[in-house]
Image (spheres, helix red, strand yellow):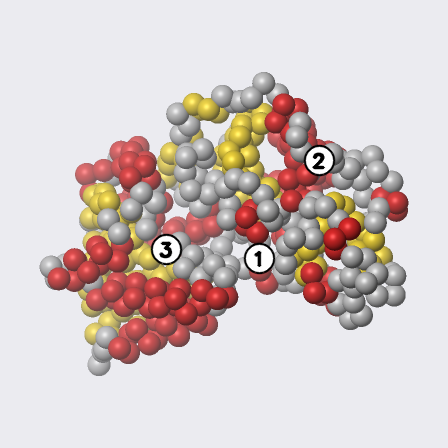
Amino acid sequence: MGLPAPAGFDAIIGDFPAVFPNVVMNSLPRLRLKKGEDRRLRGGHLWVFSNEVETAATPLQGFSPGDPAVVENARGETLGLAYVNPDSLICARLLSRDPDAPLDAEFFARRLRRAAEWRARLYERPFYRLVYGESDHLPGLVIDRFGDVLVVQTNTAGMERLQAPLVAALEAVFAPRAVVLKNTSALRELEGLESYIRVVLGGVETPLEIVENDARFLVDPIEGQKTGWFFDHRANRARLAPLCRGQRVLDLFSYTGAWGVQAALAGAARVECVEISEPALRLAAENARRNGVAGRMAFIREDAFEFLRQARRERRHYDVVVLDPPAFVKRKKDLAAGGEAYRRLNQAAVQVLSYGGILVSASCSFHWSPAALYDLLRATARHLDRQLLIFARGGQAPDHPIHPAIPETEYLKAAFCLVRQAE
């Protein structure tokens, strides 16, 4: 599918508020914190919560979404330069420890070059998460690289205001064929931002082809979920694939077949991909053909929970089951309902798993901790009278680096389990 670019980037950003490359930063308004509330920022975090602001001195109502400000502690000591959103619980995000840093194209170019240098050390091919928000000191920004096409998410009002210098920096550093703004994340709603998809530089014909772990995949950054691909499970998929040789594999929530195709390439006897999205399933089938494994794969459009119920009724069993569901726990208040969904899913998966089989149970819910996942797996095995051993633990790939001072940057967990008959 082709999506033409607009006539020029200026035509798209014409209604956006002005950005601030030429402002004298020490003339910016101040955002003062309450006593003791600078501790997290001094430890390396980048967020300020609205209840940490000394609003008597610096009222949040004095800011518009995306405004720049100099953050200072209760004693008036400068902590850095941030952008502010008075309407968000996270009311400010630090961009630089230098309060005089100009928020221009060169500012972004320096950060982008540093991010790209790390990814180039990791991967030979230019298919990866180029910018991972706070970990790359660009809070609110996500960029996935599909060769010469860059797919960008500006998830905060501050990053939305800075799109012009950001895109100029992307053009200068990477000379991409296209830059796509894929601004459909649910995070934008919390920032009071609309959802949209726009090509702001060049033009793009979709789908695109990428290579992951020597497998070839088609990616649709326009119509696909998120940016069109999930690079975060790359290492986990590589770890599982060799264990699938000669096995019957069930890939649930398969999306476009990343787990299943790589299992088939590694020699799986049979792979069934279950996915509710018809467009995603069509791409999965094409990806199987592209890799020469279509003859050993089946693609089933079905709700994963209903598929497992039917498989159990028909006494079908698999040697490997992959559970890679969407986030069931998006907020703390979802813990009870989301935890129950994880419980039902894992229990049903174990019931269709052959003795001696492998279960890969993953969660991308930040609020669902590794300890909660492991405890659920323990309880599931005990309830079903199985012996379950976790032989490996997986997380997000290294192009999603974890900032030790920002726990929110660590979200993905995967448990590789050997499930046996209880003795």
Q: Is residue 259 visible?
A: yes
- Point out which mark residue 17 bears: 2
- Point out which mark residue 325 bears: 3
* Quarter placement of the C terminus: bottom left
Helix, strand or loop at mark 1? helix
Disc 3 + disc 2, Cβ < 8 Å: no
The residue that appears at 69% across and 38% down in the rendered structure is 162
Q: Is residue 334 above or below residue 381?
A: above
Mark 2 neighbour class, 10 Å CA radius: few under 14, some 14 to 19, many 20 or more:
few
Name the spot of residue 244 as percent of width and height, x first. 27, 53
Q: Amino acid at mark 3?
A: Pro
Q: In this figure, which residue is indicated by the disc labeled 1?
A: 409
The residue that appears at 68% across and 50% down in the rendered structure is 85
Asked which quadrant contains residue 36, the reply is bottom right
Q: Amino acid at mark 1?
A: Thr
Q: Amino acid at mark 2?
A: Pro
The residue that appears at 29% across and 53% down in the rendered structure is 252
